[in-house]
Amino acid sequence: MSEMAVEERSRADGIAALHSTAGLRALAAELGGIGVPMLVLKGPLLQERLYGTRLGIACLARSVVVARMLRSRGVGATVSLSVAADAPRSAHAEVAVGKQPLRPHPGGNVLFI
């Protein structure tokens, strides 16, 4: 189904089709102008609201790609994980060589190798 067909169907169903952040902002401004509050949550903020924690995995994905690239060049790279001592649901991943992360983990994190 083409984007135009999806938009036409959405309008027929009385649902606003939002294909961009700009469209979402415009809708929020329009609703705010008539006194209808609107809360926009996306990405990590939405995850935090739904699950009580941010489930960002960008650091893990980046670390896996970099570690594989280094290993393909003969470097014994691994992915090291750490968890914040005061927030057990907050984790971080970094590339490590010889059990030493290439970049430091956030302060106060407990390191798992």
Image (cartoon, rainbow, N blue to C red):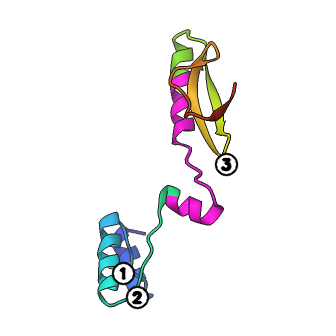
Q: Which residues are magenta?
A: 45-67
Residue, disc 3: 89
Q: Which of disc 2 and disc 3 is earlier in sequence?
A: 2
Residue at position x 52%, y 29% in the image:
65
- Numbered marks: total: 3
Residue at position x 56%, y 11% in the image:
75
**Disc marking residue 104:** none
Q: Which of disc 3 and disc 1 is earlier in sequence?
A: 1
Q: Position of residue 9 (x, y in %)?
A: 41, 81
Residue 12 falls left or right of residue 113: left
Viewer-side residue, 48 vs 27: 48
Q: Amino acid at mark 3?
A: Arg
Tag 1: Cα neighbours inside 10 Å, few (<14), some, or many (≥20)?
Answer: some
Gap between marks 1 and 2 measured at Cα: 6 Å
Residue at position x 36%, y 81% in the image:
8
The magenta stretch spans residue 65:
yes
Tag 3: Cα neighbours inside 10 Å, few (<14), some, or many (≥20)?
Answer: few
Q: Position of residue 33 (x, y in %)?
A: 29, 86
Tag 2: Cα neighbours inside 10 Å, few (<14), some, or many (≥20)?
Answer: few
Residue, disc 1: 8
Q: Amino acid at mark 1?
A: Glu
Q: Is residue 64 visible?
A: no
Image quadrant occupied by the C terminus: top right
Q: Position of residue 35 (x, y in %)?
A: 35, 89
Disc 3 versus disc 2: nearer the observer: 3
Residue, disc 2: 12
Residue at position x 64%, y 60% in the image:
52
Which secondary structure dominates the residues rendered in magenta?
helix
Mark 2: secondary structure: helix
